[in-house]
Image (cartoon, rainbow, N blue to C red):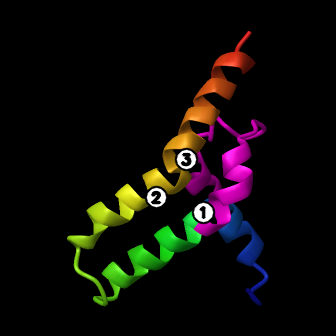
Amino acid sequence: ASSPEYARVIHRDVSVIQAMGIQNPVVGLYSKTNAQRAASLNQTMGDGLLAIIFGRADLSSLDQLVKDWRSQGGDQIRSEFEQALQTSKP
């Protein structure tokens, strides 16, 4: 980061990486459940994934991790965003 060329090099690389991304279709939309539970759900999911990655949990625990995320609000969040997407289309 201290190189005078840093900004030019990183800009080029970030531009390439950004072009590979997919636009999030729910940016700007609202889900009450997401507002209330996303932080907790994301923390639990992230912790569970890291436990698998670092060998503290078996890969087989992934199925339960996903089931828990879904039942504790993930499915409701998806449903609310699906409804918001439908009503936001012209």
> Mark 1, mark 2: which one is toward the viewer?
2
Image quarter of the N terminus? bottom right
The residue that label 1 is drawn on is: 13
Instruction: Judge whether 40 appears above or below 79 on screen.
Output: below
Q: Secondary structure at mark 3?
A: loop
Q: Which residues are magenta?
A: 14-40
Tell me where residue 6 appears, x and y as whole percent: 72, 77
Which residue type carries mark 3?
A: Gly
Earlier along the polypeptide chain: callout 3 or callout 1? 1
Tell me which residue sits at (67%, 48%) in the image.
33
Most foreground residue, 20 or 43: 43
Q: Is residue 16 magenta?
A: yes
Instruction: Judge whether 38 appears above or below 3 on screen.
Output: above
> Mark 2, mark 3: which one is toward the viewer?
2
The residue that label 2 is drawn on is: 69
Tell me where residue 35 appears, x and y as whole percent: 74, 52
Residue 21, numbered circle = 3
Q: Give the left or right position of residue 25, taking residue 6 as reference.
A: left
User: In whole angstroms, how far apart are the C-alphas of marks 1 and 2?
Assistant: 34 Å
Q: Give the left or right position of residue 41, taking residue 85 as reference.
A: left
Q: Which of the 4 image quarters holds residue 60?
A: bottom left
User: In whole angstroms, how far apart are the C-alphas of marks 3 and 1?
Assistant: 13 Å
